[in-house]
Image (cartoon, grey):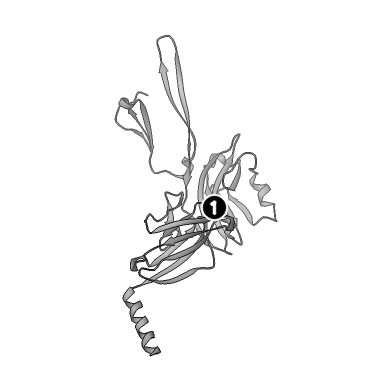
Amino acid sequence: MILNSTWRMSTRFGLINMIDKQHFKVRINAVTPDDGGVYLCGVWVNKHSYSYYIINTVHLYLTMSPVVRREGESAQIFCPYDSIYQSKSKSLCKGKCSTRDTRPLDETVREEKERLTLHEDVTASVFTGTITGLTAEDAGKYWCAVTLDRELNYLYTHLMVIIKQELSLTKYEGDDVSIQCRHHDGDQKSFCRAHEASACVKDGDSLETIRDARFSISDEASAGVFNVNITDLRADDSGVYWCGAHAVTKVNLRVKKAQSHMKQLKVQALKLV
């Protein structure tokens, strides 16, 4: 098909030829989990004496909304797939799946020692991974995979585990504060302000860190913690924060007006007189 500089759409898929930039673009509208997978992108070059194809491989990864649960609860991760893969083995892997460690669905189900069980609904073309008795170590990035002749990781989500123990801090304007947060090796150290932990996931990839010169992070890797330091607190710093990466701690920070602090000191001074 010869492309020009306008979009040529066929159902949800479209092509446009960027003639001046010597490439073309592909658009997929209303993306669904079934669209995830490997695509071949190619151009046929016809010379006077010979012709050939230039082919690139494009792997389209899709992300689902994060799954947020508390320590001790159960989490379910739903993995929809195209019905053409109904007879293929499926896997749910933390980190990323590979053909070396991917096992058929029925083998995984039979392992009673695992807290992870998989169930497949063939009619709905979806398999579900259930993790019971969640711990902070369970938090992370999980991939849904269909095992073909080669690995196929097509869909992922973030499992965020909220640590039971919350932090509640009360400070006054102008004070400094240091907040200790847990993290695991390889996790991004982040501090995010939001009412719900799921709102801290940016672009379906990781927690968004506050960008403010008064906020800084110091690492204590050997202790498995990092400290968030905030200087010159303001009343509008009050709110709910989440620190960590996938295993997150809820921090309730309340910053009182400096005037109320001075009044309190005066009352205490009068009582001592």
Provide residue 201's location: percent of width, then percent of height. Answer: 44, 53
- Position above or below: 258 against 77: below
In the visual, does 199 lie left or right of 120? left
Q: Foreground: 176 or 38?
A: 176
Quarter of the image for the C terminus: give it.
bottom left
Tell me the residue at 39%/85% (across/down). Answer: 268
Type of amino acid under label 1: Gly
Tell me the residue at 40%/10% (across/down). Answer: 48
- Position above or below: 240 against 190: below
Q: How many marks?
A: 1
Label 1 sits on a secondary structure element that is strand
Tell me the residue at 56%/63% (across/down). Answer: 71
Q: Which residue is mark 1?
A: 140
- Say which quarter of the image contains residue 133: bottom right
Q: Foreground: 222 or 193?
A: 222
From this viewpoint, which residue is outermost toward the top? 49
Q: Foreground: 268 or 22?
A: 268
In the visual, does 123 lie left or right of 208? right
Provide residue 36's location: percent of width, then percent of height. Answer: 48, 40
Provide residue 10's location: percent of width, then percent of height. Answer: 37, 34
Provide residue 96's location: percent of width, then percent of height. Answer: 57, 44
Quarter of the image for the N terminus: give it.
top left
User: Label 1: how many residues lie within 10 Å, few (<14), some (14-19) or many (20+)?
Assistant: some
In the visual, does 32 lie left or right of 183? left
